[in-house]
């Protein structure tokens, strides 16, 4: 996939992918991201738990789809910076022939993902594009994926950056409409269940970063309209098929967090 000329990476304003990386203990962030990250933790310490649980949810969902449902194509939109247990690593551990296309509009993210994808055992690539443009994404996705066969589309905590709830529904529905029966939607986002989390998001918007709007879980649940939700449905991330015993995940119970997720099949 051809390289794209990148604008200068801004280090004077925070970026959600870099702040998220900081909360997860990563090193791919700048002073402004760490400053905003620390201020956010002071408002809602549970945000660090949300960061970890979101990655665990991704791991469990991809492992299920690649290992038990025969999905070998993944479109990870708004992927963020690489961390442990990335989509291509989890999918290709289950099915080495899996093909993964990451999508993000941040040049730092794209550079890091492309560097990691280049060393993947199977097919992994990264497209620089905005999640608000599903038509463009799908047009370019055909260079990597076979869109006549089922694809798992992933929106992992990114649609809170959409300008409105109507925009959330448009993005998901336009994306899923172009994919065949047997495709899947993997989705999680932040909810308004926690006053502290709502305050955190409001303060983050004042920092110069792209605002993130948590929404009522009933609205987010409607993203799956017309699709068949897998058990246990749309639930707090720690409650979605928790691992009982694992070398990478603690089996200790985790309290609910203000982030809900689910996986659904297109009939």
Image (cartoon, rainbow, N blue to C red):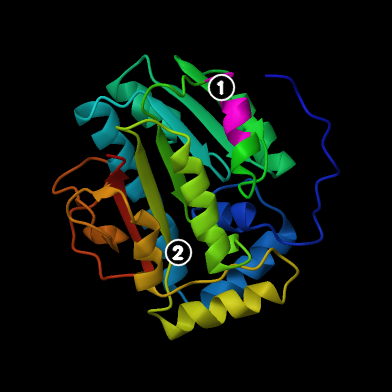
Instruction: State the mark number for residue 48.
Output: 2
Q: Residue at x 27, y 60 (%)?
A: 234
Q: Residue at x 31, y 40 (%)?
A: 266
Quadrant occupied by the C terminus:
top left
Q: Are marks 1 and 2 in contact (CB under 8 Å)?
A: no
Instruction: Answer few, some or many: residues within 10 Å of disc 2's Cα (few below 14, many 20 plus, some between 14 and 19).
Output: some
x, y percent for residue 140: 63, 27
Q: Nearer the viewer, residue 180 or 249?
A: 180
Tell me the mark number nearer the camera, choosing from 1 and 2.
Answer: 1
Q: Residue 231: x and y, percent?
A: 17, 51
What residue occupies the far left of the structure in this picture? 244
Residue at (48, 50) in percent of width and height? 172
Under circle 1, the secondary element is: loop
Say which quarter of the image contains residue 19. Answer: bottom right
Is residue 83 among what the camera can see? no
Over which residues does the magenta segment extend?
137-144
Residue sitting at x 38%, y 79%:
193
Mark 1 or mark 2, which has the lower sequence index?
2
For residue 259, which quarter of the picture?
A: bottom left
Secondary structure, magenta segment, majority class: helix
Spatial separation of the CA atoms under disc 1 and disc 2: 36 Å
Which quarter of the picture shows residue 255?
Answer: bottom left
Mark linked to residue 142: 1
- Please, what secondary structure does the residue beneath circle 2 have? helix
Residue 251 point in image, percent of width and height: 18, 53
Question: As displayed, is residue 139 above or below residue 160?
Answer: above
User: Left or right: 141 with respect to 181?
Assistant: right
Q: Is residue 119 above or below residue 230?
A: above
């Amino acid at each position: 996939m051809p390289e794209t000329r990148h604008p200068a990476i801004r280090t004077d304003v925070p970026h959600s992918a870099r702040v998220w990386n900081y909360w997860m203990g990563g090193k791919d962030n700048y002073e402004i991201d760490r400053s905003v990250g620390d201020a956010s933790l002071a408002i809602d310490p549970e945000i660090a738990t949300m960061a970890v649980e979101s990655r665990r949810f991704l791991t469990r969902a991809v492992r299920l789809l690649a290992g038990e449902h025969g999905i070998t194509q993944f479109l990870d939109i708004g992927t963020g910076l690489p961390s442990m247990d990335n989509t291509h690593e989890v999918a290709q551990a289950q099915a080495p022939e899996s093909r993964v296309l990451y999508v993000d509009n941040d040049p730092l993210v794209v550079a890091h993902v492309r560097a990691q994808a280049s060393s993947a055992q199977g097919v992994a690539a990264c497209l620089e594009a905005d999640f608000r443009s599903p038509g463009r994404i799908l047009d370019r996705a055909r260079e990597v994926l076979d869109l006549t066969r089922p694809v798992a589309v992933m929106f992992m905590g990114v649609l809170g950056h959409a300008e409105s709830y109507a925009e959330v529904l448009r993005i998901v529905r336009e994306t899923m409409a172009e994919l065949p029966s047997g495709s899947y939607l993997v989705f999680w986002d932040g909810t308004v269940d926690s006053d502290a989390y709502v305050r955190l998001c409001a303060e983050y918007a004042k920092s110069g970063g792209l605002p993130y709007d948590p929404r009522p879980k009933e609205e987010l649940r409607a993203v799956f309209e017309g699709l068949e939700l897998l058990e246990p449905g749309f639930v707090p991330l720690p409650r979605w098929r928790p691992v009982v015993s694992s070398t990478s995940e603690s089996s200790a119970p985790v309290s609910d967090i203000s982030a809900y997720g689910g996986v659904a099949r297109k009939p």
